[in-house]
Structures are given as C-alpha cells and as structure tokens.
Image (spheres, rainbow, N blue to C red):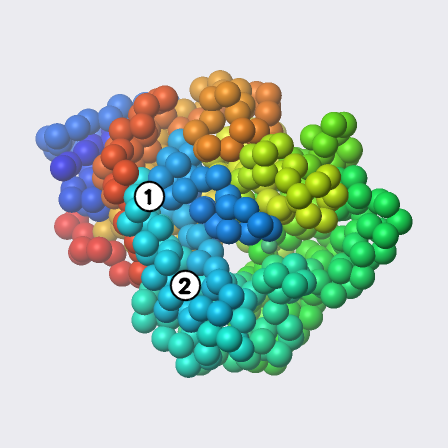
C-alpha cells in the first residue's frame, strides 16, 4: 500500500515546514516539495498539520485493580486512543501476586491476542513482588523480550506497593540491563496512616482522597526515588507528577545533569481538587492518584512543561465506570478503585489550551506527546518523528475542526469523561499506523489487529527503522 500526503504543514519536534510525504510498505519513504509520484491513495492535507502519531506511555487497559477491572480492553482502549491521534501506547503489565515476570508477560500477550489492538502496543513490567514469584534474574531477561522499562509503585500499601529494598534492587538491575525505571512516587506508608485516621473519624467522602494525600508525600517519594536511582546508577522516569513540590526535585536533578525525567498527565493540567466535592458521590469520578490538586498547581505544571523540568504528557488512562465501579464496596473514598479516563483527549486538550492559548509551541506539543516519549522508551527513530525510514504513524490534524468532548461521543467504554462539555478547536482528521489509515473523520477504518506488539530498544539505544529508507 502506498500513500501520498500532499501539502501538509509537517511538524516535528524540531521542524515546521510545508511538504509532501510518500509512504510505502508502512514506512515513510520520501519527503519533499511537490512530489510527483503515483500512489494508491493521495490525501490532500492543505491547511492541515501532519504530526508524528502521539505515543501514550501510561495506560491501564483490562487491568485488575482495586477489586475490579478497568473497563477498556485492548481493542476498545486502542480505538479510543486512535481517535485522539495516538498511534502507539505502552501499557503496564502488572505482575499479579505469586506470578513470575514471564507469566505476567504471557498474560498480557494473551490479552492483546484476545482483544486485538488497532494501534501499536508495548509493555512495561510493573514489579510488585520479589518474594513469591519474580526474581531479579528473570527481570534481567525482559529487555530481550522488548520490555525495557521497570515500573514500581511506592504507594498502594497492601496491594502493589514495594518497599525501598525492592525498589533499589530493581534499580540495580536496570543499571545492568539498560532498563528505564519508572516510579509512582508517593509515600505509601505515611498515606496509609493518614487515610486510616481520617476514616476512623468518619471522613469518608471523595474529597478526603485529596486531603489524605498531601503534596509533600508525593515530593518526598519523588526525591527518594531520585536519590536511590542516582546511587544505583539507573535512569529514572517519574510518572504522573501532579504538583510543584514534586516538580522541584526533578528540576534540581535535571539541572545537575542526572538521568531523571518527569511526566504529567492531561488531567492534572485541567481538573482541580474541587471536582472531588461534586455531590451525590459524583466526586468519585475524580478519585485517581495522585489526586487532583489545588488549581494554582496547574500553572506550575504548564511552566514545568515549558522549561523541560517535565518532559512528557501521558493520560494514565485507567477507566472505571461510574457509579457501577466507582461506587462499589460501600461509599468510602479509600475503597474506590483509583483511576480516571482520558486516552482520547490528550491532543485535543493540549492543542487547544496549550498551543492555541500560547502556552506551548506546536513543536513542543510534538515533543511532549511523541518524540521525547519515543526517545525515553526505546522507540526512536522508528517512531516519534517524521523522517525517511520511520514508521508512517501520522496524524493529519485539522487545526480548525470544532469538537465538543463528551462521553456521548467518545470511543472508550467508560461512561463519563473528565473533560465533559469542553469545546476545543483542533482534532485529528486522518490517523495512520504504519501507513494504514485507521481513522478517517468519525469513522474507524482499522480492523482489530491493525496494531502490533512493539519490541522496544534498551534505554539510550535506537530502535532501528523497520526497513531502510529508499530516498
Ligand atoms: O489512580 C490511578 N492513577 N490509577 C492507576 C494506577 C496508577 O497509580 O497509575
Ligand atoms: Zn500511579
Ligand atoms: Zn497509572
């Protein structure tokens, strides 16, 4: 299949120019001006942007968590991602209690066999236990399987939280194997004490989710992980940074030239803690972790995205239906499964409120949602840019298309949207994965199975293009 995309404004992390892109056999074959080549399909991109497909490094599809399972599988979740311009995601393969890492990985491969994705998919391994199944030796083998990032939860005591010994040992393995360590940075022990005290006093409404997870508990764990990673010699990526106290240690480490990066998520830029106070248990929709923070934190996060204290924006899509799942187990905040949806709206929100409102440039949008993520997670330059030889994962973006975000029209299975009713200007028109059109306007063109598992390179190494450029 060959495709010629003509006359678009091609945006990468570094460039912004008008040109044509010729795609053959899934890869970008040629980029130039007024290309006179016949192709099986020609797309007129006049007046549109052509962006590298976005990459989401933080999703939880079909994940058992908090006593229930997230309501998107790999078909519905990747379909929703595709409609938002995301062409690759990296999901967390969680080590279930008592299982080995090989078993955990096998279970996740089964998930994408059963519910086939429409975009490309990679896995991080989430290490939850080194005592009853997982061993450090087995962990060291995972990069050979294309799983080159190790995730650890420093919170969720009694569930997936690990202690510092486990965290540090995994960091040492990462140093040996070329893995990237990812942390959910919150002090789970302190939070557990604070939560128990609040519940004992009958403080069980959703707002107590935020009040029992002070920003300092996030900042402390962020700093601890940074210092331990430094000692172990491992590169570190801090997920879902929600507030300035947590940005600060990351910024300091980066100023020193340490191998530390931070991500925030769309919701922390737009949803504040007052959402948890919505009446009739509706606040439970916003019980995700870290919690929504006071509104003044949002401008700190935007600034960090500009200064590169934070280097990526993900979605942390972790969808549970409301109230069926968010209301289960009795109405106490601490038993509500933690997680919120958002896989489809990252580019909508960042383009409208970030680019159009002058907070970030188009190049920075691409960097934050695609290029930096590809570089950190072993996907670059096969993905994350528009260059000869790269996969033709492309978004023809209509900067003038009006779109109202709503659960009534979104494509995930979840029955609410964190940004319900928000009107944005700018949306994907056509989305391609490896040269195949998967979304066109409001229509899904891909069959499940259009997406493939991607074996990622080790940290700092390039993922070579699938085939050589034919320029
Ligand atoms: O509340 C959240 N974020 N749930 C998903 C698991 C995690 O902590 O990322
Ligand atoms: Zn987390
Ligand atoms: Zn998460």
* Residue 212, position as x, y percentages in the image: 79, 51
Q: Is residue 405 above or below residue 112?
A: above
Residue 282 visible in the current orientation? yes
Circle 2: element type: helix
60 sits left or right of 186 in the view: left
Is residue 364 among what the camera can see?
A: no
**Figure quadrant of residue 26:** top left
**Which of 375/332 is in front?**
332
Query: Depth check: 361 or 258 in front?
Result: 258
Q: Relative to the observer, which residue lies in front, 105 or 308?
A: 105
Q: Which mark is residue 115?
A: 1
- Tag 2 and tag 1, C-beta contact below 8 Å: no
Marks 2 and 1, the one that precedes in the sequence: 2
Q: Position of residue 113 (x, y in %)?
A: 29, 49
Q: With respect to residue 212, does 136 lie above or below?
A: below
Q: Quadrant of residue 447?
A: top left
Which mark is on residue 104? Answer: 2
Which quadrant holds the N terminus?
A: top left
């Amino acid at each position: 299949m060959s495709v010629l995309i003509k006359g678009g404004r091609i945006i990468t992390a570094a460039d912004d120019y008008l040109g044509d892109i010729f795609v053959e056999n899934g890869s970008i074959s040629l980029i130039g001006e007024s290309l006179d080549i016949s192709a099986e399909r020609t797309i007129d991109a006049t007046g549109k942007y052509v962006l590298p497909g976005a990459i989401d490094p933080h999703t939880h599809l079909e994940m058992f968590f908090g006593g229930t399972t997230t309501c998107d599988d790999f078909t519905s979740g990747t379909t929703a991602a595709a409609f938002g311009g995301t062409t690759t995601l990296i999901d967390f393969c969680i080590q279930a209690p008592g299982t080995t890492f090989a078993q955990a990985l096998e279970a996740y491969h089964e998930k994408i066999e059963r519910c086939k994705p429409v975009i490309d998919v990679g896995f991080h391994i989430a290490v939850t236990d080194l005592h009853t199944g997982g061993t450090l030796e087995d962990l060291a083998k995972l990069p050979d399987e294309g799983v080159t990032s190790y995730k650890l939860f420093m919170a969720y005591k009694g569930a997936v939280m690990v202690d510092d010994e486990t965290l540090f040992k995994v960091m040492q393995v990462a140093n040996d194997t070329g893995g990237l360590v990812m942390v959910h940075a919150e002090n789970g022990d302190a939070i557990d004490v604070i939560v128990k005290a609040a519940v004992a006093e009958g403080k069980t409404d959703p707002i107590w989710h935020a009040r029992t997870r002070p920003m300092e508990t996030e900042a402390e764990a962020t700093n601890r992980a940074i210092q331990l990673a430094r000692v172990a010699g491992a590169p570190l990526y801090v997920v879902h940074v929600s507030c300035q106290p947590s940005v600060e240690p990351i910024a300091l480490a980066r100023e020193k030239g340490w191998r530390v990066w931070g991500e925030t998520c769309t919701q922390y830029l737009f949803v504040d803690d007052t959402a948890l106070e919505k009446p009739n248990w509706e606040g439970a929709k916003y019980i995700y972790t870290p919690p929504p923070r006071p509104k003044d934190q949002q401008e700190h996060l935007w600034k960090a995205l500009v200064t590169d204290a934070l280097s990526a924006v993900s979605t942390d899509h972790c969808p549970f239906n409301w109230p069926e799942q968010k209301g289960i187990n009795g109405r106490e905040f601490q038993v509500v499964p933690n997680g919120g949806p958002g896989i489809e709206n990252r580019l909508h929100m960042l383009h409208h409120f970030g680019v159009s409102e002058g907070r970030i440039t188009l190049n920075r949008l691409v960097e934050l949602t695609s290029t930096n993520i590809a570089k950190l997670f072993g996907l670059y330059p096969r993905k994350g840019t528009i260059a000869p030889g790269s996969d033709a994962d492309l978004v023809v973006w209509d900067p003038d298309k009006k779109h109202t975000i709503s659960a009534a029209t979104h494509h995930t299975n979840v029955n609410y949207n964190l940004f319900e009713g928000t009107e944005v200007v700018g949306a994907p028109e056509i989305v391609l994965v490896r040269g195949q059109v998967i979304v066109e306007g409001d229509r899904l063109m891909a069959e499940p199975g259009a997406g493939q598992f991607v074996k990622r390179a080790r940290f700092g190494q390039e993922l070579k293009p699938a085939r050589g450029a034919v320029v």
